[in-house]
Image (cartoon, rainbow, N blue to C red):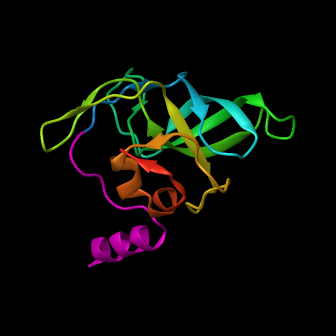
Amino acid sequence: MAARAKQRALIARGMLGHGPKISRGLPTGALLKCADNTGARELRLIQVMGYKGGLRRYPSAAVGDRIIVSVRHGSPDMRKKIFQAVIVRQRKPYRRAEGIWVQFEDNAAVIITPDGEMKGSEIRGPVAKEAAERWPRIASAASIII
């Protein structure tokens, strides 16, 4: 009963469950491009939210994961601050359930608020289908979904 209520709460917040396993291509410390218009240009991955791994294993993230980032380059009011973000593209190839392999040119993320709303109003470049399915608010702002 409690699990069903938790799932409803996640859906209401705009976060749906994970589908098939995706290759984790972004370890902590990775640099990502900021794909929205918040003023940040480059982000550094600090932590993966909800990550449960083995002892001494670096947390790593994949497309659609919620992460904590620090802004490395961008507008002065955004720099050196910590935000939550969602990964929308990754360079490492990953396999979809239908058998095709997907790979993007760069690693990119979109900054979000703690309750799952997008901080910016538009997204530059394509967004992975996995991220769009899990985050409906990102899907509505995306121009291209691959």
Picture quadrant of residue 53? top left
Q: Is residue 99 left or right of residue 3?
A: left
Q: Is residue 7 left or right of residue 137?
A: left
Percent of width and height locating residue 63 = 39, 39
Percent of width and height locating residue 64 = 40, 46
Q: Which residues are magenta?
A: 1-21
Q: Residue at x 58, y 42 (%)?
A: 124
Percent of width and height locating residue 72 = 72, 26
Q: Identify the image quadrant of the C terminus.
A: top left
Q: Residue at x 38, y 36 (%)?
A: 62
Q: Is residue 75 left or right of residue 107?
A: right
Say above or below: 125 vs 60: below
Q: Which residue lies most toward the front here?
A: 143
Picture quadrant of residue 83? top right
Q: Which residue lies most toward the left here?
A: 99
Q: Identify the image quadrant of the N terminus.
A: bottom left
Say above or below: 131 vs 140: above
Q: Nearer the viewer, residue 98 or 57?
A: 98
Q: Nearer the viewer, residue 129 or 43?
A: 129
| 8 part of magenta stretch | yes
Q: How many marks?
A: 0
Q: Is residue 54 left or right of residue 78?
A: left
Q: Nearer the viewer, residue 4 or 38?
A: 38
Q: Residue at x 76, y 41 (%)?
A: 39
Say above or below: 28 vs 125: above
Q: Which residue lies most toward the right here?
A: 76
Say above or below: 68 vs 104: below
| 37 part of magenta stretch | no
Percent of width and height locating residue 27 = 44, 24
